[in-house]
Image (cartoon, grey):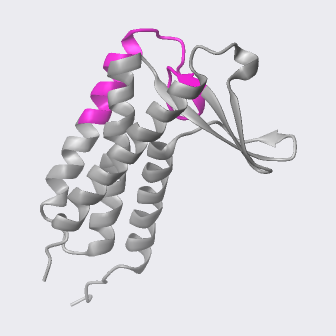
Amino acid sequence: MIRPYLIGLPIALVVFVADQVSKHWILERLAGAPWQEQYYYVAPFMNFALAMNHGVTFGMFDHNGGANVLIFGGIALAVAAGLLYWLRTVDRALVAIAVGLIVGGALGNCLDRVRYGAVVDFIDAHWGAWHWFVFNLADSAIDTGVALLLVDSLLGRRKSPT
């Protein structure tokens, strides 16, 4: 039987690598172009549009300049370290998968902050003229991991009340 933590680590690595490769690809194509050309059509409901997020989720706290790299990068590293520590004791595959997704995403965004001073966002999902906030693969992995942890907490094993 495979130990659950051995599932979470490769998932974290795959998420991290896929996130960084996708960001490298988008930066090669759109960085340095005039702002009107920093756009790549994907489907009727999605575009790739380069956005550098100096803040956190949805661009909040995007006013602190270089301090954000230290603050948010440090928080991401601390969260990833805590989750990796927790991963050693996980006994369910679903939790290991969730933690792997969150760790890989957190480390991907953290590396962006160190390399670029901001997180590279580029997925622009929309419905007609209504656009959601621009995000990236790391954000998607983190959100999916959190959702899986919520599902596990609702459907996970219950201890008997004895």
Residue 151 occupies quadrant: bottom left
Q: Is residue 127 left or right of residue 82?
A: right
Residue at x 53%, y 12% (from the top left corner) = 63
Q: Can residue 24 be seen from the camera position used here?
A: yes
Q: Residue furthest front?
A: 29
Is residue 93 found left or right of 129 in the rendered image?
Answer: left
Task: Give the quarter of the figure containing the C terminus.
Answer: bottom left
Quadrant where the image shows the N terminus: bottom left
Q: Residue at x 76, y 18 (%)?
A: 36
Q: Residue furthest right?
A: 129
Comparing 162 with 52, the one in front is 52
Residue shown at the point (32%, 47%) measured from the top left: 104
For the residue pair 79 and 107, the one nearer the viewer reads as: 107
Left or right side of 77 for 38: right
Instruction: Name the image quarter holding residue 111.
Output: top left
The picture places residue 125, in percent across and down from the top left corner, at: 70, 45
Figure check: 36 above or below 99: above
- In front here: 11 or 71? 11
Q: Where does residue 12 sit, x and y in percent of width and height?
A: 29, 52
The reply to whether the magenta stretch includes residue 72 is yes
Magenta range is 51-77
Q: Is residue 28 magenta?
A: no
Residue 123 position (above or below residue 4): above
Give x and y (percent) for residue 28.
51, 26
**Is residue 60 at least partly visible in the picture?**
no
Q: Position of residue 117 (x, y in %)?
A: 41, 16
Name which residue lies at 70% across and 16% down: 35
Count of marks placed on residues: 0
